[in-house]
Amino acid sequence: MSATTPDRHFPQRELPARVALKSPGGSPGLLDGAWWPRSRDLLRELPALIDVLDPRWARITHICVNPRLWPVVPRKIPVTGHVVKAGWFKAEQDPHKLLLLSYTAGRWDLLVVPPETPAPAAARLMAAATDGTGPQLTASGLMAAEATHHDATVVDRLQDREEAWEYEGGASSTYAATPVSRLLVGM
């Protein structure tokens, strides 16, 4: 590869982090915000997030994830100006949460919206994670609520299609009303 050809796996210019944070002084809760990474590659995704968080919160020194959603969890991740140490817990850590630690300022918890999440669902999840007025849900609780919302929407669309079929003569047509056993007997 030539020096002028950008590597398609590591582009010259990274995209900004997709992150939503609770407003300063907002009501405390189970989550401090949400992050929607573009991939499941911590080495690639975390530096952009840390670039956003370090100036707002304090220098992030450690993170903790659940490896269920991250295929590789490196021990150290180089970010702008320093290295972030990474750890993981399988049973103790909510799989949809990223724990961030700073020596000087404390701890923050972010909902991790899976990269493959459609934009409308991601927007709802990020808004729910930063809303201080709604019910306080865990990261997995928010994901389950979104899945329920999605399933209800799909069921509504299916019911609409079935109703349309009915109105167009679907089940009430002569052929559809014929019992299956009669059709098989005549063959």
Image (cartoon, helix red, strand yellow):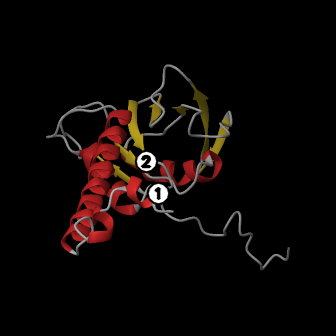
Kindly tell me whether residue 43 is visible in this rendering: yes
Q: In the picture, which quadrant includes the N terminus?
A: bottom right
Mark 1 surroundings: few (<14), some (14-19) or many (≥20) residues within 10 A: few
Residue at figure coordinates x 54%, y 34% from the top left = 61
Choose between 120 and 101: the one closer to the eye.
120
Q: Is residue 1 above or below residue 152?
A: below
Residue at figure coordinates x 77%, y 78% from the top left = 5
Identified by mark 1, the residue type is Leu
Residue at figure coordinates x 65%, y 40% from the top left = 71
Q: Which residue is mark 2?
A: 113
Secondary structure of residue under mark 1: helix
Extreme-top residue of the structure: 92
Residue at figure coordinates x 48%, y 25% from the top left = 93
Kindly tell me whether residue 105 is visible in this rendering: no
**Badge 1 or badge 2: first in the primary sequence:** 2
Q: Is residue 163 left or right of residue 185?
A: left
Q: Is residue 133 left or right of residue 97?
A: left
Choose between 128 and 46: the one closer to the eye.
128
Mark 2 surroundings: few (<14), some (14-19) or many (≥20) residues within 10 A: many
Find residue 129 and report its image quarter.
Answer: top left
Q: Is residue 125 above or below residue 4?
A: above
Task: Find residue 105 and report its horizontal and vertical position in percent.
Answer: 39, 31
Q: Is residue 60 above or below residue 41?
A: above
Find residue 83 and report its image quarter.
Answer: top right
Identified by mark 2, the residue type is Val
Task: Find residue 146 and report its horizontal and vertical position in percent.
Answer: 32, 46
Secondary structure of residue under mark 2: loop
Q: Which residue is mark 1?
A: 184
Q: CA distance from mark 1 to mark 2?
A: 51 Å
Task: Find residue 51 and report its horizontal and vertical position in percent.
Answer: 49, 53
Q: How many tags in the picture?
A: 2
